[in-house]
Image: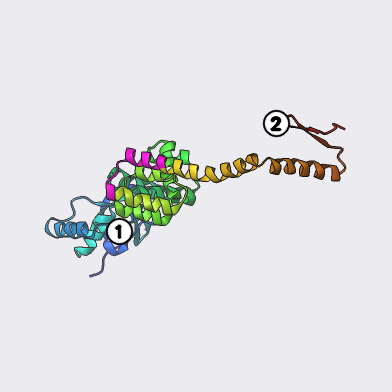
Amino acid sequence: MSIPAPSTAAPARVVQSIPVAWIRPNPYQPRRNFSERSIDELALSIRRYGLMQPIVVRRVSAAQYELIAGERRLRAARRAGLVQIDALVQAAGEEDSAVMALIENVQRENLHFFDEAEAFKKLLQSHGLTQEELARRVGKNQSTIANKLRILKLPPAVRDAIYTGGLTERHARTLLRIPDKITQLELVRTIRQESLSVKATEALVERILNRQFAEQETPRKRRITGVVRDGRLLLNGIKKLVGQAVSTGLSAQSNISDKGDRLEITIVIPKH
């Protein structure tokens, strides 16, 4: 039996029974991972009791719709063998559809922060929105959007380790202070093995940065100390610089006076 095409004169918001085959996924779906077990359980529930809440779609053409909200419900309905599904048809353009898909997932509060950040980035790049405009659309502060985007600066390998390790967004932001990927990965392992809190992680990062700074400073201090201890090297350096100045035509002079316990060096360079 052929499935009749839905009327093209549908109101802005109306629940319709739509062929599942006519619904395409939302390219801006922020959620990248779905629990197969959860979908199996929902599919079993749909077989027994039907779909309790309609999905949300927008019409793309007479025989095609694009999903806005309800990815898990749609997957479960397909797995349950449904041919048609109840859907709330929403009048929306591509940008509105993308924003609504993001908001729907954010409101559920279990969207991973990396997925949320990627969705923000995609919206900014695809639709030319500013961070302020996006913040107004999704009901967040601009600083929140900026902080979400910052965590995408972490290398992919570090992000994967954070994701699989179940670390929090605050852990991820703390790792941004570390400049190299190897140390970041080592930190992720330490945080997981020792179950470090965010506060403990911040303290550990501070110690690592202080140690790295000290290691960088020590060789430089040794070089300066070596030059100062060997007065001859310092004197020869000064004489060499003055000699180079004279060779370029500058009338420079240097004078070294032995004061017994010290040497006084005078360099004279005419203004004109």
Residue type (three-letter) at the residue carrying disc 2? Arg
Magenta span contains residue 196: yes
In the displayed structure, would residue 47 be above or below residue 149? Answer: below
Mark 1 crowd level (few <14, some 14–19, many ≥20, 10 Å Cα): few
- Measured in 3D between alpha carbons, the distance from the residue under mark 2 to the one under mark 1, in whole angstroms, is 100 Å
Work out which residue is located at the far left of the displayed protein and give it: 48
Magenta span contains residue 205: yes
Residue located 20% across and 59% down the image:
37
Q: Nearer the viewer, residue 153 or 135?
A: 153
Q: Which label belongs to residue 262?
A: 2
Which of the two discs, 2 and 1, labels the residue nearer the N terminus? 1
Q: Nearer the viewer, residue 26 or 6?
A: 26
* Residue 158, visible in the rendered structure: yes
Task: Indicate which label's residue lies in the foreground, 2 or 1.
Answer: 2
Residue located 53% across and 43% down the image:
218
Work out which residue is located at the far front of the displayed protein and give it: 260
Relative image position of residue 180 (x, y in whole percent):
46, 51
CB atoms at circles 2 and 1 under 8 Å apart?
no
Q: Nearer the viewer, residue 104 or 141?
A: 141
Q: As drawn, is 177 to the left or to the right of 247? A: left
- Indicate the quadrant containing the C terminus: top left, top right, bottom left or bottom right: top right
* Residue 58, visible in the rendered structure: no
In the displayed structure, would residue 80 be above or below residue 101? Answer: below
Residue located 77% across and 44% down the image:
240
Relative image position of residue 248 (x, y in whole percent):
85, 45
Q: On the image, which quarter does residue 221 sit in?
A: top right
Q: Which residues are magenta?
A: 193-207
Q: Which label belongs to residue 6?
A: 1
Relative image position of residue 143 (x, y in whole percent):
43, 37
